[in-house]
Amino acid sequence: MNSFTFVPIGTIHTPFHDIAGMPIQPTGARGTKGTIAIAEAYREGLRDLGGFERIILIYVFHKCTDHQLMVKPFLDTTPRGIFATRSPKRPNAIGLSVVRLIAVREEIVEVEDIDVLDGTPLLDIKPYVPEFDAYPGSCCGWLEAVAVNAKTAMSDDRFR
């Protein structure tokens, strides 16, 4: 298989300095503000982003040192296959969050509803477009019965 190298386009800053105690999804981080410092080489790419209400952040789980194919997710006690979870212990430690865009100011992007660890390297930003990205009523497997708990569940240190 091929391997790939990615260069971060910026750094995400949030109030979360430890993996334990963080929200496990953006739905549990409502109102939490953060900023993204975009590297100079990529700032021109922020043009026209300001018209979107939400954006998709693609980032590196930079504090995860290995992966697991079976995990006990935060919302369950049953071991699950990694690809049926949103656990950060992935073969490629890539995460994504849909956050509210507050403002774009030169090299700083202000966001809200952020569930990301402070200092996280940002790989990409994509606009969230409801017509492309939302599928209301979709089945969500084993998470169907527990997804509502993501609003209040906090992480622990099991995925360091």
Image: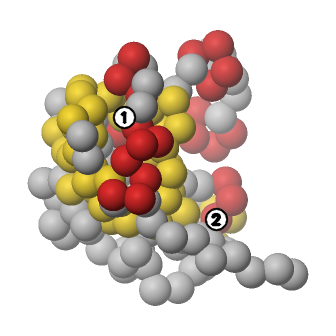
Circle nearer the viewer, 2 or 1: 1
Nearer to me, 15 or 150? 15
x, y percent for residue 109: 27, 40
In this rendering, the answer to whether 138 lies above or below 20 is above
Which residue is rendered at x = 67% and y = 21% of the image?
Answer: 132
Give me the residue at 46% from left, 86% from top.
65
Where does the image place residue 5, in percent across and percent down from the top left? 62, 77
Amino acid type of the residue that numbered disc 1 sits on in the rendered structure: Val
Q: From the viewer's perspective, tell me whether residue 38 is left or right of residue 144.
A: left
Count up the numbered dots: 2
Does 86 appear above or below 148? below
Q: Is residue 93 left or right of residue 50?
A: right
Q: Quadrant of the N terminus?
A: bottom right
Q: Pinpoint residue 9: horizontal percent, then vertical percent.
A: 43, 59
Determine crowd level at label 1: few under 14, some 14-19, many 20+ residues with C-alpha closer than 10 A: many
Horizontal and vertical percent for residue 83?
68, 59
Q: Which residue is mark 2?
A: 82
Residue 20 visible in the snapshot: no
Quick check: can you spot residue 110?
A: yes
Q: SS at mark 1? A: strand
Tell me the residue at 43%/53% (across/down): 42
| Label 2, label 1: how far apart the Cα atoms are | 23 Å
Q: Which residue bears the numbered disc 1? A: 99
The residue lying toward the viewer, choosing from 69 and 65, is 65
Q: Are marks 2 and 1 in contact (CB under 8 Å)?
A: no
Q: Quadrant of the C terminus?
A: bottom left
For residue 150, side relative to residue 86 (left or right): left
Q: Is residue 74 above or below residue 62?
A: above
The quadrant where residue 68 appears: bottom right
Q: Is residue 135 left or right of residue 118?
A: right
Q: Nearer the viewer, residue 59 or 45?
A: 45
